[in-house]
């Protein structure tokens, strides 16, 4: 029998996979995608809690998370395009002109 | 147990319907284009020269797949082999499973159990269709990227831009349809179209949402990437666009996906705007003809008539799309984007506002 | 919820998430992320969140990921070179993540063991979610539209070429 606890564990595992991606990868787009995995792990936890408590709020929150993620993707990818135009690279450790 | 069995039978039935119709459309397209261009069309398919006479479309139906799947499966050098192999499936799969939410008949009683004549009973049926349509873009995008070919890549960039653009107009048009039906459930929509208005006119969605019908039909054709919206493959500019580097069975999969999308668009338009499986004036107990009284019909005949009505309507819209494909020239890229963003999107938005205002004015909102 | 459905879906989600993080080709990463998102949509559907599952595919898999792919193709990103040098960082991060994930999983498992609430048949349908969205969460919902407007304007300004024809 699968309960919401199983989904919570899955969400924890996914969250840390995403975190490893953010920390170890150098490609900005891949870092970005790892952030999306973390956001989605959070969404899964919200939905699992909504299912467990029998309240709909968890599902409503997911709606907002998705909207914010969509807005973030639009702006973030625009930033990446602008960076690529100026620096010809999207490697996080080569974009260091602001580092002193 | 029987639930699983019924589900399996229904999905198999729908899958076979879509696949068969897609293959059949290939033949219709050959003969139809010949008719329009004053040619004879495919007439040489012959079974090993044994059958001395032409069996009509049967020969072409058999010959085309055999020819396609026995050709060399060419894989270009320096491509991403995994993604190259994945792309045809990504194109075909969403197109085939979209039909699951489209009802093809009223619920029937079978051995004491009520069976809904559609594959899944979804509360969010229309959103499911929109979701699957939006997944269809990956086939084209991945195919172009994985082919290691400039033309293919150009084709897939065009394709992804086009499909995102027209999805917006389609989504907005669907919003106004949802507003006027008050449900996302497609079976409920078809039931709502079973009434008559003014005593004789079937209450088909097209009479209430004509603008949404045109937008969804056009956007649907754009989603299936066929002429006049075929700039992702534009054979005179990009060789064959995103599937330039595909041959044999994989290319057949792309063609099949195209035709399956044609069938899906036809099914969607039929269900939303032309009464789905509703036969005009036919209720569960028989015909209720205006001015002429009632004719009793048995339940089995009613079900058969509904299935037939649905198939004929779908076939008609498939034919309409093929007709458009062979009579209208291809758009230029900027014309296509203009039509999507400056033409259809504002109209769809205005339609949503108009519909919402009308519903509010009539006090139908709860 | 049958284990026969949950475990394959969960395995697909975890494996494709690992592929996102480890793949060297950005396009492969993106396709793996699409697989993760679709698996999560299946999880939402299992948790009686049908509307959220449909939105997940429309918004995330259908729109956001296409945008990612579009940008990857626009920039014509090639495969990343094999990671060298920072082996310590990678194994360190991996180790810490495994320990933390284990701890989180243990706590979550213990605190959410046992049966949850009994759900109504209509739980997670469009009507129920929409009622919550347009009553309790109306102000955040309206603010979201402002956020999206800001994002659209910001994206256009950022990605615009200064020397593009037609600009002043």
Image (cartoon, grey):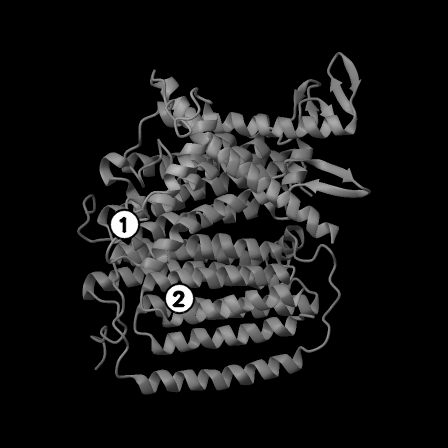
- Residue A60 seen in this snapshot: no
Is A33 left, or right, of B173 in this rendering?
left
Task: Please rate how many residues cluster around mark 1, counting C-alpha atoms within 10 Å: few if below 14, some from 14 to 19, many from 20.
Answer: many
Q: Which residue is mark 1?
A: B153
The quarter holding residue A45 reads: bottom right
Picture residue at 57% right of the left edge, 57% below the top: C52
Indicate the chain on which mark 2 is placed.
A
Q: Above or below — where is A75 with respect to B265?
A: below
Residue B122, x across and y down, in percent: 64, 48
- Residue C97 seen in this snapshot: yes
Helix, strand or loop for disc 2: helix
Front residue of this view, candidates B83 and B57: B57
Viewer-nearest of labels 1 and 2? 1
Residue B50, x across and y down, in percent: 42, 26
Residue C46, x across and y down, in percent: 63, 61
Q: Which residue is mark 2?
A: A33
């Amino acid at each position: 029998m699968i309960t919401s606890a199983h989904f919570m564990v899955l969400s924890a595992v996914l969250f840390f996979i995403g975190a490893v991606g953010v920390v170890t990868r150098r490609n900005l787009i891949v870092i970005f995608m790892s952030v999306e995995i973390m956001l989605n792990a959070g969404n899964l936890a919200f939905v699992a809690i909504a299912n467990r408590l029998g309240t709909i709020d968890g599902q409503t929150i997911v709606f907002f998370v998705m909207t914010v993620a969509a807005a973030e993707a639009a702006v973030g990818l625009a930033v990446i395009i602008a960076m690529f135009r100026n620096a010809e690279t999207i490697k996080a450790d080569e974009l260091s002109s602001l580092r002193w | 147990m029987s639930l699983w069995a019924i589900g399996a039978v229904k999905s198999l039935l729908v899958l076979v319907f879509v696949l068969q119709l897609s293959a059949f459309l290939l033949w219709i397209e050959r003969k139809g284009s010949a008719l329009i261009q004053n040619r004879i069309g495919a007439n040489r398919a012959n079974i090993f020269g044994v059958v001395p006479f032409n069996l009509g479309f049967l020969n072409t139906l058999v010959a085309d797949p055999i020819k396609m799947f026995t050709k060399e499966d060419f894989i270009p050098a320096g491509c991403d082999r995994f993604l190259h192999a994945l792309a045809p499936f990504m194109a075909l799969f969403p197109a085939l499973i979209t039909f699951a939410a489209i009802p093809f008949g009223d619920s029937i009683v079978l051995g004491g159990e009520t069976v809904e004549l559609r594959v899944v009973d979804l509360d969010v049926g229309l959103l499911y269709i929109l979701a699957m349509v939006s997944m269809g873009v990956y086939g084209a995008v991945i195919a172009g990227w994985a082919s290691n070919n400039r033309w293919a890549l150009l084709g897939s960039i065009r394709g992804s831009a086009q499909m995102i653009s027209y999805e917006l107009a389609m989504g907005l048009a669907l919003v106004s349809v949802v507003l006027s039906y008050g449900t996302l459930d497609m079976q409920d929509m078809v039931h709502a179209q079973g009434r008559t208005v003014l005593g004789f006119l079937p209450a088909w969605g097209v009479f209430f949402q004509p603008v949404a019908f045109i937008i969804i039909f056009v956007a649907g054709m754009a989603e299936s990437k066929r002429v006049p919206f075929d700039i992702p493959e534009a054979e005179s500019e990009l060789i064959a666009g995103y599937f330039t580097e595909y041959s044999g069975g994989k290319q057949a999969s792309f063609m099949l996906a195209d035709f399956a999308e044609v069938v899906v668009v036809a099914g969607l338009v039929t269900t939303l705007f032309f009464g789905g499986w509703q036969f005009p004036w036919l209720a569960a107990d028989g015909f209720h003809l205006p001015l002429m009284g009632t004719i009793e019909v048995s339940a089995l005949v009613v079900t058969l008539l509904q299935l037939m009505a649905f198939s004929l309507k779908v076939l008609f819209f498939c034919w309409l799309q093929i007709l458009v494909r062979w009579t209208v020239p291809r758009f230029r890229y900027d014309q296509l984007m203009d039509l999507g963003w400056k033409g259809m999107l504002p109209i769809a938005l205005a339609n949503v506002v108009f519909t919402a205002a009308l519903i509010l004015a009539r006090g139908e909102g709860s | 919820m049958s284990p026969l459905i949950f475990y394959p879906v969960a395995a697909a989600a975890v494996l494709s998430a690992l592929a996102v993080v480890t793949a060297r080709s950005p396009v492969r990463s993106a396709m793996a992320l699409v697989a993760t998102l679709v698996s999560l949509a299946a999880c939402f559907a299992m948790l009686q969140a049908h509307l959220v599952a449909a939105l997940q595919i429309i918004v995330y898999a259908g729109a956001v990921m296409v945008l990612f792919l579009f940008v990857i193709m626009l920039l014509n990103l090639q495969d990343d070179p094999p990671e060298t040098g920072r082996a310590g960082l990678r194994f360190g991060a991996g180790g810490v993540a495994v320990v933390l994930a284990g701890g989180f999983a243990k706590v979550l498992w213990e605190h959410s063991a046992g049966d949850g609430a009994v759900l109504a048949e209509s739980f997670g349908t469009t009507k129920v979610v929409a009622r919550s969205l347009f009553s309790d969460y109306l102000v955040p919902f309206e603010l979201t539209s402002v956020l999206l407007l800001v994002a659209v304007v910001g994206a256009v300004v950022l990605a615009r070429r200064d020397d593009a024809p037609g600009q002043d």
